[in-house]
Amino acid sequence: MDILTDEHEREEAVRKWWHEHWKPIALGVAIALLGLVAVRQYQAYDLSQKQETAFEVYQLQNQLLSRGNAALGDAQKFLDEHDDIYGAILALNMANVVLQANNYTEAERYIDFAKDNGSELMQPQISIVEARLQAQNAQYDQALATLDSITSDAYKAEILEVRGDIFMAQDKTDEAHDAYLQAINLLKDAKLQISPMLQMKFDNVIQPGDTPAYKIMAEQAQEAAATLQQASQEAAAAEENQ
């Protein structure tokens, strides 16, 4: 286009250019907007589907916890349709259920399913369940090696508890005592709840000078109550000052 110095000529040139090109521009904008709407609709649908699937897993986990083997049929139906991370999560719960029933073949099958379909974030949990299976099969050294391969500190207390279980299976009560005590102290320092099962295990191998686990739990409950009361008082004081 020649350089236009006259304002009227510039306006005429713009109008002419717009008249020739407005249709493809408008079409391009419409397609882009439709694409954006479609992407957002898909994202909303995808999120909704994931929420529904996660809730279904949660319900099945509760059934496995309360009904045990009786809930395996419904859980298996879900597994048949979900060779993904949701199925992997549920498979670990199923492995724990059949392990308690000493069904090691089924436990191994569920662990393999979790390995094949779970994410890297699940590997520590998978390894812990696998170590339990190995210990049940009297593969104690292999079980301890599996636990040692876990590098995440987030599972340290659970790893120590399983180590204690392995030592107990070998009649190494002193080593079991130390592992359980480390797990309890770790949870206590982190102000996390000590499970009744861990309390029972530790109190079963308690040694002179140890504080029974139930007393540690009582101390934790008192500390929690004091913290809650202080927070309530601070909230009330803040409300009065407003």
Image (tube, helix red, strand yellow):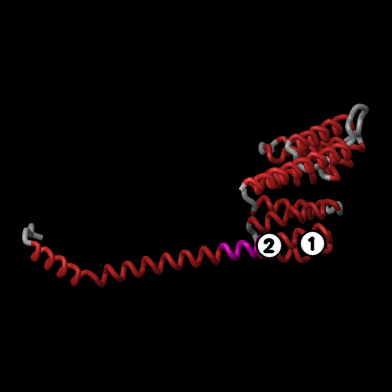
Q: Is residue 86 left or right of residue 14?
A: right
Q: Is residue 202 visible?
A: no
Q: Give the mark nearest the N terminus, 2 or 1.
A: 2
Spatial separation of the CA atoms under disc 2 and disc 1: 12 Å
- Residue pictured at 38% horizontal, 67% vertical: 33
Q: Quadrant of residue 30?
A: bottom left
Element type at mark 2 = helix
Q: Quadrant of residue 151?
A: top right
- Residue 157, relative to residue 75: is it above or below? above
Rendering coords of residue 180 (x, y %): 83, 35
Q: Is residue 92 left or right of residue 99?
A: left
Rendering coords of residue 32 (x, y %): 37, 65
Q: Amino acid at mark 1?
A: Gln
Q: Is residue 50 visible?
A: yes
* Magenta-colored span: 47-56
Q: Rate crowding at label 2 as few (under 14), some (14 to 19) or many (20 or more) other CA atoms within 10 Å.
A: few
From the viewer's side, name the closer residue of 208 and 169.
208
Q: Amino acid at mark 2?
A: Phe
Rendering coords of residue 199 (x, y %): 86, 41
- Residue pictured at 89% horizontal, 42% vertical: 200
Residue 134 lies within the magenta run: no
Q: Quadrant of residue 69?
A: bottom right
Q: Which residue is mark 2?
A: 55
Q: Are marks 2 and 1 in contact (CB under 8 Å)?
A: no
Magenta-colored segment: predominant secondary structure:
helix
- Residue 23, relative to residue 183: is it above or below? below
Mark linked to residue 63: 1
Rendering coords of residue 185 (x, y %): 79, 33
Mark linked to residue 97: none
- Residue pictured at 72% horizontal, 66% vertical: 77
